[in-house]
Amino acid sequence: MAMFDQLSDRLQATLSDVRSRGKLTESDVDAAMREIRLALLEADVNFKVVKAFTATLKERCLGSEVLESLDPGQQVVKIVNEELTGLMGGTGGDLALASSGPTVILMAGLQGSGKTTACAKLARHLGESGKSVALAACDVYRPAAVDQLVTVGERAGAHVYQQGTERDPVDIAGWALERAREEGRDVLIVDTAGRLHIDEDLMAELSRIRKKVKPHDVLLVVDAMTGQDAVGVAESFAEAAEFDGVVMTKLDGDARGGAALSVKAVTGKPILFASTGEKLENFDRFHPDRMASRILGMGDVLTLIERAEQQVDEKQALDLQEKLKQDRFTLEDFLQQMRQVRKMGPLSGLLGMMPGMGAMKELKNADVDEGELDRVEAIILSMTPAERADPGMINGSRRKRIATGSGTRVQHVNQLVKQFDQMRKLMRQMASGKMPDPQQLAQMSGGAPRPKMRRR
Amino acid sequence: MVERLEHEVEAGAVSADGEAVRDRLIEILAEVASAGRAPIDLSGEPAVLLMVGVNGTGKTTTIGKIAWHLSREFGLSVVLAAADTYRAAAAEQLAEWADRAGADLVRSEAGADPGSVAFDAVAAARARGADVVIVDTAGRLHTQGNLMDELAKVRRVIAKQIPDAPHETLLTIDATTGQNGLRQAQVFAEAVEVDGVVLTKLDGTAKGGIVLAIANELRIPVKLIGTGEQLEDLRPFDSTDFARALLAD
């Protein structure tokens, strides 16, 4: 993940230095604290938050916990990890659920922060566990906002309650709640218009909507690339709307992430969800401990495993194993595997979840070219099942047809077939217990059917 | 900028009292902010404007405002191109603005190729003898290489139809965006040659200071500012006003 990259690099450098020193003196700790302070400020973290954070950190690091420890460097890392986790929300929060009737979730935030998209993503996320989710279209100001929510809401598998743009949003919200109750929905997510925290009229309207539907959760949607202004916005919304948690959006950008680190510290409210990409599925519970772990280069194996579990069907995996053993692995199988991995999320995001990625600087800065994967998929999809099962039968005229059908060139088709062949040879060797021929390996990595890494 | 001010005060060019220093700082800031400034180029026949930017920065709303100003204040005929074929109801949103602004709309079905919508709009504008075409595009994060490539392609499609077009490529920057704004401008400029910035949402509490860095380092000036969600909430950029607001509490 490109977000937090700069902070991550600097913190990891500081901590790696600390770990290499053996016993730590007070001045060693002081120096490390200074570096950490600078790193956080450069990451756009609110300066008041940085001051308080480093003060707490310093106190702990100068205590016996560290100085008398057998491995002070490692203790410091542990403390930074714990404090960074706490900064973003500690053990994380949870959505409060209704004991009877629908759970009402009210979404609020500035214009353009991503509320409507977040509503649909949250609806899909909650729907995954079998809940019946409905959405209320209370943005009557932004042109086509209702249409947008209807479209994305339905895509997310949720029912959308709307009454056009002529009614008072407070009344629409009340009506939607009635319908949700009548229809026995488990969750009602109320979308609202973007509003400035300094717009008294609109903030008053938000307050009225709150009183009308009595939400179990009020979520503030915050764009992760917001700069210093994030803190002022969060404070104002906290005062006017008393929100319970934050949804961070556009985390797939490369902003320094200071907003994400400051909001909880300033308002006391945790980040509950994170939106990490264009698609509806790019939406997760936010785990402060896992994020802190990623920033410090310790990876996020838990999320990686969760995502893999969601995609991999155990029986399919066993079948695949058999096929590999018996050299019956086809382009069709390859396509399925590639799709499963891609469903786990943008590949650049997955890389960031692997421990130790901080050390592999080159890989981290590469930009996985999803476009090339799209091309490989298109080529395989343009093949007939027979061709996928036996690429050897793909002669010149077939190659032309496949190239045309997939919008690529014959040389791309040639490349895919050749490299798939080399890959199968390699797998045959490994299956029979032989070490792969280094020359063949080199040939393969010269451009195997895997994503092209592009330097940013 | 601070160094420069220090030198001037030390050299006696600026008297060392609070007010004089402040005024001079405003002048310096304004100078940096107006780097490379030029008015919006409407000389083409039709003139083609391309709007680009990250998701949620105000492209579509800004297009509505520009169209309204061109149509109501200068009597120009405007065609809007709904080349955001990705976002749900994007064309409907632009249609509403076209209506309010008195402009024509060219659209396609969702998921269509954005380049083809731009092409159709320019062709339609030429056929009808319209004065201006404004092309809306989908919001995209600059970190997505393939989407930046797509944007470059849209630009090429337009350029093939009319040499020198698009005559004006405007990048919307949300005033609340932090340091990331500079990075956004760098990457978008690599993909499509940005001619100017529209600094949006200045009616909030953020001041958009990052445009100083964009003007200074990339020589891309701010041409317009957005100050609200209504048609009238658009003004030409005034560097002195901006500098004053930056220093105000």
Image (cartoon, grey):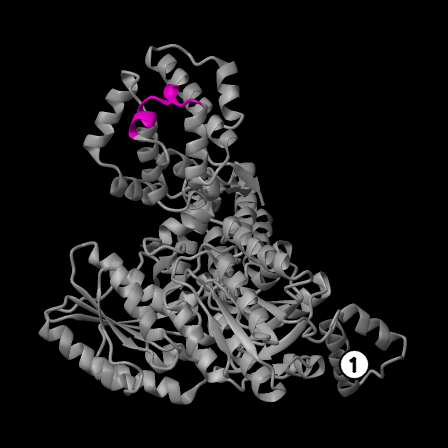
Looking at the rendered structure, the secondary structure element under dot 1 is helix
Q: Amino acid at mark 1?
A: Arg
**A391 vs A136: above or below:** above
Report x, y in % for residue B48.
Answer: 61, 69
Q: Is residue A84 left or right of residue B52?
A: left
Q: Quadrant of residue A435?
A: top left
What span is in magenta?
A385-395
Q: Quarter of the image holding residue B197?
A: bottom right
Q: Nearer the viewer, residue A6 or A22?
A: A6
Q: Is residue A227 magenta?
A: no
Q: Classify residue A215 as left or right of residue A418.
A: left
In percent of width and height, residue B231 lies at 51, 84
Q: Is residue A438 left or right of residue A140?
A: right
Q: Is residue B55 above or below residue B6?
A: above
Residue B164 at x, y = what percent?
69, 62
With respect to residue A85, does A189 lie above or below? below
Mark 1, residue position: B24
Above or below — where is B167 with respect to B77? above
Q: Residue placed at 48% from the left, 56% from the top?
A: A57
Dominant SS in magenta? helix
Coordinates of residue A259 in the picture (x, y in percent) = 47, 64
